Image (spheres, rainbow, N blue to C red):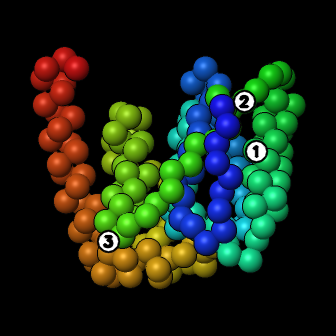
Amino acid sequence: MYKDPLQPGCYYHIYNRGNNKENIFIEPKNYAYFLMLWKKYLHPVTLTFCYSLQPNHFHFLVYIKEERSTTEISKAFSNYFNAYAKSINKSYGRTGSLFQERFGRKLITNEKYFLEIIYYIHSNIQKHGLYNDFKKYPYSSYISLLSDKPTLLQREEVLDWFGGKKAFVDFHERNQELMVEYLRELQKLNL
């Protein structure tokens, strides 16, 4: 399936999952390697605001740097996903496509959606029932955004969108409570 190329100067929600919904992260070191490759291939062409790496899929919120050409951007993403897939295939004796298809992307065009997509990305692991409290999940940017440790994330900009660190935490907690209630209702209905 053809997708429009990523455009410089735009914000995107980037995502993909394993082929046949298989895991793309087999063990903890895979998550670190995926992020190391992100730094190598994609940090030069993107600014990253948040992410979540889950066993069989991932999400990122990025801004495509304006000074990059669409060809340069496309090549960086291709090299990134190919390098990771080749490593996993070699390490685990697998063959074929690791990812389901070309990575998905959704253009982010308004500020309200920024806040919603950041919460969505962080809480996705809990929504899928894979982790009890997304705020403690080690393979997302939530903890890093609240930390004072150095990061390649655009921490200050993210926190400013929410109105500061406290507002960021409050927004996530308020929405988490709603999500937990919603999931309980679905369980009662056996959905």
Q: In which quarter of the image is residue 102?
A: top right
Locate residue 54 relative to residue 125 in the image: left or right.
right
**Which one is in front, 67 or 22?**
67
- Classify mark 3: helix, strand or loop: helix
Q: Residue at x 68, y 52 (%)?
A: 5
Q: Which of marks 3 and 2 is nearer the N terminus?
A: 2
Q: In which quarter of the image is residue 56?
A: top right
Q: Earlier in the sequence, mark 1 or mark 3?
A: 1
Amino acid at the residue labelled 1: Phe
3D distance between C-alphas at marks 1 and 2: 9 Å
The residue wearing badge 2 is 98
Q: Which residue is drawn at 78% across and 37% down?
A: 85
3D distance between C-alphas at marks 3 and 2: 34 Å
Amino acid at the residue labelled 3: Phe
Q: Is 114 rendered above or below residue 5?
A: below
Image quadrant occupied by the C terminus: top left
Amino acid at the residue labelled 2: Leu
The image shows residue 130 at horizontal and vertical percentages of 41, 35
Q: Which residue is drawn at 47% across and 71% down?
A: 145
- Classify mark 1: helix, strand or loop: helix
**Which one is in front, 171 or 14?**
14
Residue 81 - label: 1
Locate residue 108 relative to residue 105 in the image: left or right.
left
Q: Earlier in the sequence, mark 1 or mark 2?
A: 1
Q: Residue at x 29, y 61 (%)?
A: 172
Image quadrant occupied by the N terminus: top right
The residue wearing badge 3 is 168
Tag 2: Cα neighbours inside 10 Å, few (<14), some, or many (≥20)? Answer: many
Locate residue 84 relative to residue 160 in the image: left or right.
right
